[in-house]
Amino acid sequence: ALCAVALGATAAAECILDCMERAKWIAAARTLPESGGSFCRIPLDRPPSVPRLQREAPRPTQLPDLCALYLGDLGYYGYVVALSSFMFGSLWCYAAIFAAAISERLSWMDEAAGVAVFAVLVLPLSLQDLAEQKKTQAMLAFGRLAMLVAMVVTAMVALFDQGPVAPAAPLPPVAAIAELAPVVAFSVVLHHSVPQIVAPVEARTPYTLNVVFRVAFVGAVAIYALFAVPVALLFGER
């Protein structure tokens, strides 16, 4: 399931990159060829009123731009509604998990206070572009790596020192893949962020970005497998 989802995610990311590259040529052909073909913060049907500053500082192409370009108004509004619902549900889930975890560890803090702490940490970051979060994202990346190493090492040490704490779980039936697939797919959902992710990246050719995403998804599969195997062997049916 991990490999299949990784392949699908890579293909989807590369399709978005290809659409972004084609959109540059379409925008350049329509108007403002001196802007390099990127979308500007102005309507495409009014090029004469564009100030010089806006032509020199175009914003990256976003997925709503692509939906409006390729799918029309219906595709644009449908995508905005779908993405807004997805982001709202994701934040709700993350806030609930964070609040439940922190209230369980800290007896003096209830879940409402946990949600407030989550909002204080997350909302300011949600209002920033990825390029503005370089230091924060670098620290979070090192933190994720440190936690992953700690979990894998402790699980392997406990496995070799005391053995499994429960009998090994049997291999799941084929029907269980249907339950696993949405969880695995959600864990690699980032396609709505592809334009923001590639915006700060300086690549000589679009193919370089394709290679970057391929390496990233293959690395994610390897990390998930490295983490899942020793933990599953240690806890077994638990």
Image: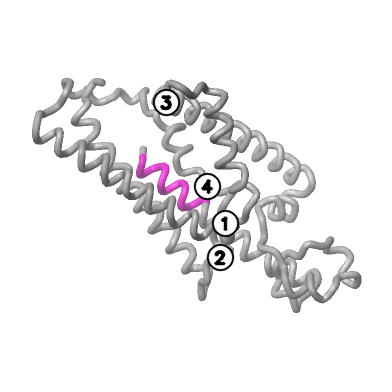
Closer to the eye: label 2 or 3: 3
Q: Residue at x 66, y 63 (%)?
A: 60
Disc 4 on helix, strand or loop? loop
- Nearest to N terminus: mark 4 or mark 1: 1
Q: Is residue 144 above or below residue 112?
A: below
* Residue indicated by mark 3: 106
Disc 3 on helix, strand or loop? loop
Q: Please give the range of residues in magenta.
A: 2-12
Residue type at the position of mark 2: Pro
- Nearest to N terminus: mark 4 or mark 2: 4
Q: Main secondary structure of the magenta part?
A: helix
- Nearest to N terminus: mark 4 or mark 3: 3
Residue type at the position of mark 1: Leu
Colour treatment of the image? one colour
- Nearest to N terminus: mark 1 or mark 3: 3
Disc 4 versus disc 1: distance between alpha carbons? 13 Å
